[in-house]
Amino acid sequence: MTAENSSQSLANRRRQILTLSASGAAVFIIIATIASYSVFRLDRTVADYTSTIETLNEMADSARVSQVRFKTQVQEWKNTLLRGYVKNDYDTYHTAFLARRDEVETDLDKLSAQARDVGFPTMGIEALRKSHSELDAAYDAALQKFVPDDPLSIRIVDAAVRGRDRPVNEAFDALVADVKAFADERRSQLRGQISDMAGAMRLRLWIAVVLGLAVVGVGAAFALRSLSKS
């Protein structure tokens, strides 16, 4: 073998080694890109789903809290009638009654907004809001007949609204149950989707790794065959 042929053979080997190295680097870059993009997508999805799950939890809490506040409002109404014959007590309990009323309205507003964010039907919430508003109007109208120094007026006022809180409380029971069922189902769905996405990501990575190794293996085989012939 002449010096020229030997130099040419060495140059060919170098080119083949460089080509093989470049192929390996390209495969590594492709795998790293796929992995990075998959992790980015998964992180974004997990963040979005986590936010949704938090909203579902808050919505379930809001439904329960609003019902508790409504029951407290009804109790403050009873306190107003039973203890309102003293002006200071009347002012205290009636103020508390009005405060709980406002809190229930605020809770229902918040619940309605949360429901829209997660796709929960708002018809039940709006119907409950209407029933609560009508009950409040009935309370206000009945209270106009209240005479603090006349014990019999308590009976008149109570008779005007007796039992009207029960359908509202039952509507709260139904709403709390519906919200809980919806939240439980959606949380389960979201967790399942996250699990499916993670599984798909792992599958794509394994496919990329296998294909990458196959490409590098084929390239290495050709390179070794060429080197052995030279």
Image: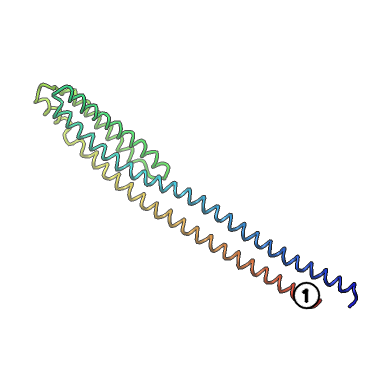
Could you tell whether 81 is left or right of 213 in the image? left
Q: Residue furthest front?
A: 3
| Left or right: residue 52 compared with residue 223 | left
- Which residue position is annotated with label 1? 227
On screen, residue 168 versus residue 35, left or right, reads left
Q: Residue, x 19% and y 31% (percent of image)?
A: 77
Foreground residue among 76 and 122: 76
Residue 71 image point, x, y percent: 23, 38
Where does the image place residue 30, in percent across and percent down from the top left? 64, 59
Would you identify the image quadrant in which residue 72 lies?
A: top left
Return the residue nearer the eye: 197 or 227.
Answer: 227
Residue 7, quarter of picture: bottom right
Q: Residue at x 23, y 34 (%)?
A: 73
How many marks are shown on the rendered structure?
Answer: 1
Where disc 1 sits, the SS reads: helix
Q: Is residue 216 left or right of residue 108?
A: right
The location of residue 112, given as percent across then percent down, is 37, 39
Q: Amino acid at mark 1?
A: Leu
Residue drawn at x 34%, y 34% is 106
Q: Considering only vertical position in the picture, is 194 above or below 92?
A: below
Based on the displayed image, in which of its 4 quarters is residue 214 positioned? bottom right
